[in-house]
Image (spheres, helix red, strand yellow):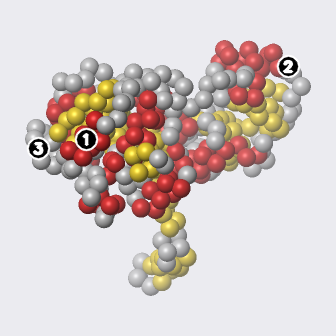
Amino acid sequence: MKKNLINCLSSLEDSIKLLNEIGKKCLIVADDNLCLLGTLSDGDVRKAILQGSKLKDNISKIYQSNPFYLNQGFYNQEDIKKIFLEKEYDLIPIVDNNNKIIDTIYLEDVIVSNKNIHTEKLSLPVVIMAGGLGTRLEPFTQILPKALLPLNGKSIIESIITQFTNVGIKEFYLTLNHKSKIIKAYFEDLNLPYNFKYIEEEKALGTAGSLHLLQKSFKTTFFVTNCDILIDTDYSKIVEYHKENNCDLTIVTSTKEFTIPYGACYLDKNNFLDHIKEKPKFSFVVNTGFYLVNPGILSFIPKNKFCNMTDFIKDLKKNNKKVGVYQISEEDWNDIGQWDDYYKSFKK
């Protein structure tokens, strides 16, 4: 039970790691004596990051300080089931007479559900950016386009498409440039049960430039993904977050931890050694290359000019457009454009 408890002075980074570790959507916030103080959901964490909180900030101001709970011995299974169905809680803490946490009841412990990841059907279009050079995967990409590199019996791009078709999506747009004829020839030989539309760049337009060519293609929000990432999460939750927060664009992000392989020297104000920290670790919220986009903002992308997604997002912010941040665990994101991650995915 203690695995889902987090101290009220813990950091946002600690809460993200614990949520990922236990595979739950909500934590119980406790003091040093394990007394109940509140609850902290993954949504609370994302909201805090969206509002400018840093990973090192503590959670004391963002957790829900008035949680629903039950006292030990004053409930039965039917009561709990009814509460979960009516209130849609993820969990209910159980406390003793001294408000000390003695147990946790999760929704899935009470209500048997057949809903697994990706079961909620979606009908949004998907744009797959497949026109890049794939320089990080050279020399293979000097022969084959990155999108067609093999991954567990199929091409990378087919693996990406499968994740969308699993939720009912059948409308795909492929932006092409580098070795586009090979990609088109590959798909012509397959009898696939979904629709493709090719958007061919006359010249390289960066990671966002080709989206300008799609200005008149969509009347609804659509997904955009790089062709070298696999995102294994509930896409309907991203859509829900995007709508609830009235975002113009939502970036799917993840926490990435980096270790400096040296002893880092920290200096005092006189530039003498203060202390050494051996192999320090740093965590960052990073862009995975996966987005949910409102079609109305495509006008901010310049016509027939090189434009990376970072430039596009910068212009959106300048024009007071709302850019959301939906965070997923590091385990749910695989950047197969990197050799190490590609190799790990290939072996799964």
Disc number placed over residue 61 in the picture, else none: none
Q: Point out which mark residue 185 bears.
A: 1
> Toward the viewer: 303 or 64?
303
Pointer 3 residue: 202
Label 3 crowd bin: few (<14), some (14–19), many (20+), radius 10 Å = few
First along the sequence among labels 3 and 2: 2
Left/right placement of residue 275 relative to residue 127 reads right
Label whose residue precedes the other's in the sequence (2 or 1): 2
Give the secondary structure at mark 1.
helix
Residue 221 percent across, percent down from the top left: 32, 25
Query: Relative to the observer, which residue lies in front, 112 or 270?
Result: 112
Question: Toward the viewer: 72 or 76?
Answer: 76
Mark 2 Cα within 10 Å, few/some/many (few <14, many 20+)? few
Residue 76 is marked as 2
Q: Is residue 76 left or right of residue 217?
A: right
Residue, far front: 189
- The amino acid on which the numbered mark 1 sits, given as a three-letter code, is Ala
Residue at image position (37%, 43%) is 157
The type of residue carrying mark 2 is: Asn
Q: What secondary structure is found at the residue carrying circle 2?
A: loop
Image position of 313 (left or right of 270):
left
In space, the residues marked 2 and 1 are separated at their CA atoms by 62 Å
Mark 3 vs 1: CB contact within 8 A:
no
Q: Which is closer to the viewer, label 2 or label 1? A: 1
Residue 56 % position (x, y): 52, 54
Classify 48 as above or below 132: above
| Above or below, comparing residue 190 to residue 53 in the picture | above
User: Cα distance, mark 3 to mark 1?
Assistant: 18 Å
